[in-house]
Image (spheres, grey):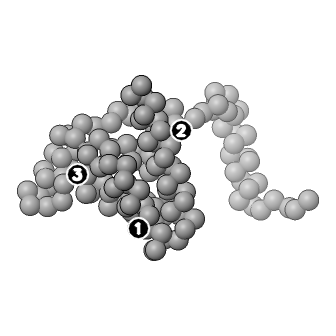
Amino acid sequence: MTAKTPFELMMEQAQEMAKAFNPAMTSFDPKGFEKLWPTMSKDAMEMFFGKGLSKSGLDAKTRLLLTLAGLTMQGAQAETPFRMTVRHAMEAGATEEEIAETIAQMSMFAGIPAMTRAMDLAREVMADKKDDET
């Protein structure tokens, strides 16, 4: 049996402390938390993140696709922000193909594992959206 790293021991301690403070934390699901955050309308996103910033600048869809590229470059480690960005990009008019192409493009810079992780997360969001529509 291999010894645990100091980080693994610290994480175990933190998890035990969280359980002691609030037993409900043992069943906390970040995806459930995401559902509490509403998807902004395309008009709201344009006002806050798109043409509202600069009349001749990037629209909200393009800004969100760029955000996805950046999150993919980080290895898609921030799952909740990544999934929410996919959701908002779709609401802003991005197609599944545009999202997939944005993520695939990053494989050249971030590597195949980062691209694969990002693509898996994006597919989850797309599947959830289809389930919500039926």
Q: Nearer the viewer, mark 2 or mark 1?
A: 1
Question: Crowdedness of circle 2 by 10 Å Cα count: few (<14), some, many (20+)?
Answer: few
Query: Residue pushed farthest bottom?
Result: 109
Left or right, residue 71 beside residue 61: right
Question: Crowdedness of circle 3 by 10 Å Cα count: few (<14), some, many (20+)?
Answer: many
Instruction: Name the residue rendered at 77%, 62% in the picture.
Output: 5
Which residue has dot 2 on it? 30
Instruction: Name the residue rendered at 67%, 28% in the picture.
Output: 23
| Labelled disc at residue 60 | 3
Rendered position, 70 above or below 132: below
Residue in the foreground of this view, choosing between 2 and 89: 89
Instruction: Name the residue rendered at 33%, 36% in the picture.
Output: 39
Q: Say which quarter of the image contains residue 20.
A: top right
Which residue has dot 1 on it? 105
How far apart are the alpha carbons under marks 3 and 2? 25 Å
The residue tagged with tag 1: helix, strand or loop?
helix
Q: Amino acid at mark 1?
A: Gln
Question: Crowdedness of circle 1 by 10 Å Cα count: few (<14), some, many (20+)?
Answer: some
Reading the chain from its start, which is encountered first: label 3 or label 1?
Answer: 3
Q: Nearer the viewer, mark 3 or mark 2?
A: 3
Q: Amino acid at mark 3?
A: Ala
Instruction: Name the residue rendered at 67%, 33% in the picture.
Output: 26
Reading the chain from its start, which is encountered first: label 3 or label 2?
Answer: 2
Q: Amino acid at mark 2?
A: Pro
Q: Say which quarter of the image contains residue 34.
A: top left
Rendered position, 112 above or below 99: below
How far apart are the alpha carbons under marks 2 and 1? 28 Å
How far apart are the alpha carbons under marks 3 and 1? 19 Å
Residue 40 x/y as whole percent: 28, 37
